[in-house]
Image (spheres, helix red, strand yellow):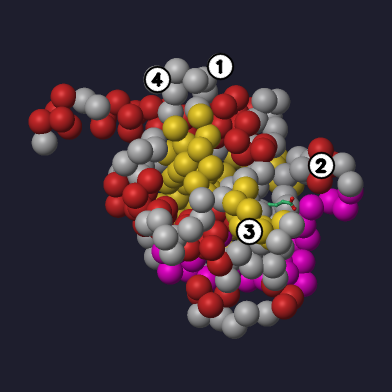
Amino acid sequence: MPDTPQAPLIGVPADVKEIDGYRWHAAAEPYLRAIVSGFGGVPLILPSMADAIDPGSFLDRIDGVLLTGSRSNVHPERYGQQADPASEPYDPARDAASFGLIAAALRKGVPLFAICRGMQELNVALGGTLISELQEREGRHDHRAPVSDIQAERFAIHQDVAIAADGQLAGVLGPGTIRVNSLHRQGIGDLAPGLAVEALAPDGTIEAVRVVGAPGFAIGVQWHPEYWVKSDAPSAKLFAAFGEAVRAHMAARTSPATAAE
Ligand SMILES: N[C@@H](CCC(=O)NCCCC(=O)O)C(=O)O
């Protein structure tokens, strides 16, 4: 069990959903379990209430941030476009929380791992844009989940992704091509300044990015390593690398040199 004083505490911003007439703040369990099984971390779901709680105020109390995927989309007004029923559902409370966490994590050097919607949030937060309904775009493949009622089939690993030979992920996963799952309708349109491409799909869709010059681990992936973290080597390596970065951050934060500052 990871519940020891040394276990890293990983902040996970909640999605906000209407259930039984209330707004609920929730996160999907596979991300939470991957934090535990991937590197012995302890997940902490953070309420997405940026109107009442500054997301940056969490950053001195957590050791890393994981931005999860979600069926909801970043609101288009965040990147200068109009809301469109075709790109719903939105979750503006999640947007506000994630954008606040991204800014604070990058400012403070807190390791940040962004998955699917999380990578899209990272791109928009740093000034990029998104494109919707990839499968309707000329030359793009269908990146949506396989149609099934069985989650393991929806998260099946079936798509090639080429890892940039000169990027950070090549050091984690090795250069070349890996196979990943794919469950998204949107993708990066204009890449944000300050982001570097770390992986590409065969149709040119950006599948991973890193924040150039980030003081710590700051990686986004469009696929879902959380789902097969126990059985898929690239997925396990990604979470292990995030965990290693988090522990290094914890050590640096408690080092005598830091204390003397
Ligand atoms: N909504 C965005 C991001 C996709 C994403 O995060 N998918 C995770 C949910 C997977 C599922 O259960 O369908 C997009 O569609 O691009």
**Kind of residue sitting beneath label 2:** Gln
Quadrant of the picture in which ligand 1 is shown: bottom right
Position of residue 25 relative to residue 186, above or below, is above
Distance between the alpha carbons at the discs numbered 2 and 3: 25 Å
**Can you identify the residue that label 1 sits on?**
1
Q: In this view, which residue lies farthest toward the bottom?
A: 82
* Residue 178 in sight here: no
Distance between the alpha carbons at the discs numbered 4 and 3: 33 Å
Distance between the alpha carbons at the discs numbered 2 and 1: 26 Å
**Can you identify the residue that label 2 sits on?**
151
Q: Position of residue 165 (x, y in %)?
A: 50, 43
Which of discs 2 and 1 lies nearer the camera? The answer is 1
Whether residue 165 sits left or right of residue 27 in the image: it is left
Asked if the beta carbon under badge 2 is closer than 8 A to the nearest atom of ligand 1, the reply is yes
Dot 2 or dot 3: first in sequence order is 3
Distance between the alpha carbons at the discs numbered 3 and 1: 31 Å
Position of residue 88 relative to residue 143, above or below, is below
**Can you identify the residue that label 3 sits on?**
23
Q: Position of residue 98 (x, y in %)?
A: 48, 56
Q: Position of residue 99 (x, y in %)?
A: 45, 60
**Kind of residue sitting beneath label 1:** Met
Quarter residue 258 falls in: top left
**Kind of residue sitting beneath label 4:** Pro
Magenta range is: 120-148
Residue in front for this viewpoint, 165 or 36: 36
- On residue 5, which mark appears? 4
- On residue 189, which mark appears? none
